[in-house]
């Protein structure tokens, strides 16, 4: 069992951006258990611990903001991205829960749920010998667009933002579909690796 200890010298933080993320492209049954643990530590434990460490001072000052970078993958049980999607579902749910707890405290919390972003993430998430999972180019957004959307959402005190029209529309349709239909579509989709 891994433990995560966070020891930081006292610092004054106005905005916390939990942006670290780690992925893995391929079937869960052939996944590396160490990589799965690393994903849980980076995607779940780190933002939880950092938020817990810095939130009390924001509450005391009655101001602050927390941007938790989640993913649109967190809305779905995605074959080939099981652990990643599950950890990002945690980030979105965690963000929504602490946002509700902070009502009236002067601290804004926003979950940022982009689809694919033009970064090295896909290359790092691929398995040795595999191809990076790229998805449809229509869903890709630039890092600048994600940053602008995230900061605007935090400023407007919005609970969640999905940057990019195509991904926002796709997630709306997905969330309106009955879960049995979503499961059928995912079951029929080609799995990775």
Image (cartoon, rainbow, N blue to C red):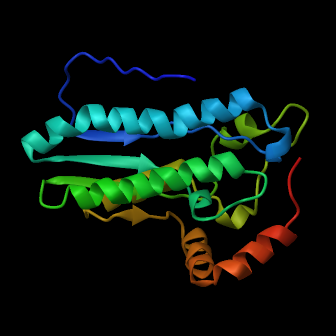
Residue in the picture at 37% in, 54% down: 95
Residue 151's place in the image compared with 49, above or below, is below
Q: Classify residue 178 by image quadrant.
A: bottom right
Residue 21's place in the image compared with 118, above or below, is above
Counting from the top left corner in percent of width and height, residue 5 is at 40, 20
Counting from the top left corner in percent of width and height, residue 26 is at 82, 45
| One can see residue 9 in this view | yes
Counting from the top left corner in percent of width and height, residue 66 is at 31, 47
Residue in the picture at 14% in, 44% down: 59
Residue in the picture at 30% in, 36% down: 52
Residue in the picture at 25% in, 34% down: 54
Residue 6's place in the image compared with 29, above or below, is above
The residue nearer to you, when weighing 129 against 78, is 78
| Image-based side of 15 in relation to 39, left or right | left
Residue 166's place in the image compared with 129, above or below, is below
Counting from the top left corner in percent of width and height, residue 171 is at 58, 73
Q: Quadrant of the N terminus?
A: top right
């Amino acid at each position: 069992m891994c433990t995560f200890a966070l020891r930081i010298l006292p610092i004054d933080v106005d905005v916390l951006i939990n942006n670290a993320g780690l992925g893995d492209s391929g079937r869960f049954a052939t996944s590396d258990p160490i990589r799965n643990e690393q994903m849980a530590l980076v995607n779940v434990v780190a933002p939880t611990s950092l938020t817990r460490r810095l939130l009390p001072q924001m509450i005391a000052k009655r101001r602050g903001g927390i941007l938790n970078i989640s993913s649109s993958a967190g809305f779905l049980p995605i074959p080939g991205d099981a652990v990643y999607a599950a950890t990002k579902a945690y980030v979105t749910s965690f963000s929504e829960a602490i946002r509700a707890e902070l009502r009236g405290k002067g601290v804004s919390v926003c979950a940022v749920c982009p689809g694919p972003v033009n970064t090295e993430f896909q290359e790092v998430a691929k398995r040795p010998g595999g191809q990076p999972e790229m998805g449809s180019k229509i869903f890709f957004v630039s890092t600048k667009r994600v940053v602008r959307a995230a900061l605007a959402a935090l400023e407007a005190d919005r609970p969640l933002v999905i940057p990019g029209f195509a991904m926002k529309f796709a997630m709306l349709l997905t969330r309106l579909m009955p879960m049995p239909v979503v499961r059928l579509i995912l079951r029929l989709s080609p799995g990775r690796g």
